[in-house]
Amino acid sequence: MTSEILMITTLIAIWISLFMALVVVCSATHFWLKQSKKVTEIKPLKRYPKVTIIVPAHNEDVVIKPTVEAILNLNYPADKIELLLYADNCEDNTYQVMQEVVGQPQYQGRDVTVINRHGTGSKAGVLNEAMARAKGEYLCIYDADAMPEENALHFLVEKALENPERHVAVFGRNKTRNAKQNFLTKCINQEIVVTQRIQHVGLWHLFKIGRIPGTNFIIQTKFVKSIGGWSKGALTEDTDISFKIMQSGKLIALAFNSEAFQQEPETLKAYMMQRKRWAKGNYQVVISNFKHLFDNSNWRVKLETFYYACTFFAFNLAIILSDFVFLFNIVCMGLEAFMPGIQLPFTFGERNIYLVQILLFNWLLMILLYLIQVNIAMSTQMGQATAQQVWIALAGYFTYSQLFIIISVDALSSVILDKILRRDGTKWVKTKRFTD
């Protein structure tokens, strides 16, 4: 009886995950087919609202110079940009590099302030301080490693002005600027492209659900003040504020053609530390919002919570249980050579349909869907649709993608222990940077 319950639970979890992924893939495909018939143009905006660009930087002297230069060279009226550069509790030369960049002759007269900050609250603390002093109608956030393409801000503002009452925030896409560094960065690049070109696009196109990605986005200054700014107790302040925006009934719109190039971890240790922080922060936010599945909250909050639950709970449960059942049956099949008559513990009743066969079918579907996602995503981006990407995707599925399970289990365990032991689980760990 126990084995049958375990098998059925595994299959239900797998099919829930597959169904949600398939819906999003179909939606994204429809979007890109429609978009392929259009030509992207840089049209003058109806108006150019003042934008305060904030760059929080903690020990970022390796990457900060090209980022600041890219921001100062944006295709947006210079007199409509206020730039606030924060060297947040730095122990390196971030502050000095910032001053050197803005001191160059071509940037004289620009509205730029470099702040050597020694406050608390990490990134959320910086954003709240900047919000209080900002003069712009919109706040625009760029991480220290995120180099915006010259028209990135133009496209963000253009999307906001389509419906300023509802589009209180607009987010763009982030691309990997060190994608060719090694196998890890190539896999991360594929993950980023799938996330940006499939998941974000699919959810926005079908449900008008957007997610603030942490960098390369704008948000109305008056709105973010009305919701109390950024939560200092959240490891992923972007996910936290996304739920707040959806709860208000407003939209986080997608400007798919706004791009920024960010640096990704180049070592396994740096990657694991970064993704554990992300996963733990997402778990914290999803768990705190789980109650909204059963109250009168905005339907987008409910759907987003359900989607996160499918990703972080159903998918993980499916993989863990299916791996356990598969390995247990393999062990029993091996023992059968020495102990004739031994029975496989996980089968479907008298007809003796081995679960390994059913799970194999599901795994094939999961691999197929994964490859479809990667290929569709790559085909929508210039120069990414190559035969090499298919082989990277296959290798990555059996190696890189499996790290997600380890990270998620570790992060969830940490969240649970934080609750039980009443310890502070909001310690922020900086992502290591590398020279380009």
Image (cartoon, rainbow, N blue to C red):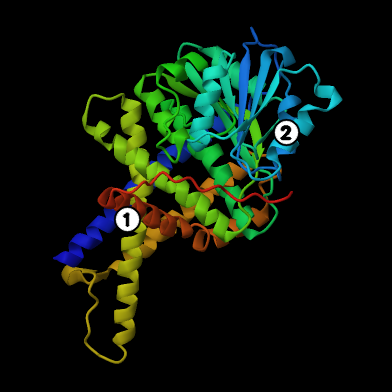
Residue 392 percent across, percent down from the top left = 61, 58
Residue 157, image quadrant: top right
Which residue is rendered at x = 24% and y = 70% of the image?
Answer: 346
Residue 304, image quadrant: top left
Q: Residue furthest right?
A: 105
Q: Is residue 409 left or right of residue 135?
A: left
Which residue is rendered at x = 41% and y = 27% of the image?
Answer: 207
Which label sits in the foreground, 2 or 1?
2
Q: Residues within 10 Å of mark 2 (few under 14, many from 20)?
A: many
Q: Is residue 298 left or right of residue 67?
A: left
The reply to whether residue 15 is in sight is: no
Badges 2 and 1: C-beta atoms under 8 Å apart?
Answer: no
Between 363 and 247, which is closer to the camera in this rendering? 247
Q: Residue furthest top?
A: 46
Q: Residue furthest left?
A: 1
Q: Is residue 318 left or right of residue 390?
A: left
Q: Of helix, strand and loop, which one carries label 1?
A: helix
Q: Of helix, strand and loop, which one carries label 2?
A: helix
Report the quarter where the N terminus lies: bottom left
Residue at mark 2: 98
Residue 313 percent across, percent down from the top left = 33, 49
Residue 180 percent across, percent down from the top left = 70, 53
| Circle 2: residue type | Met
Between 292 and 399, which is closer to the camera in this rendering? 292
| Circle 1: residue type | Leu
Between 78 and 339, which is closer to the camera in this rendering? 78
Position above or below: 240 against 113: below
Residue at mark 1: 317
Residue 433 percent across, percent down from the top left = 65, 49
Q: Indicate which disc, 2 or 1, sits on the residue closer to the N terminus.
A: 2
Q: How many marks?
A: 2
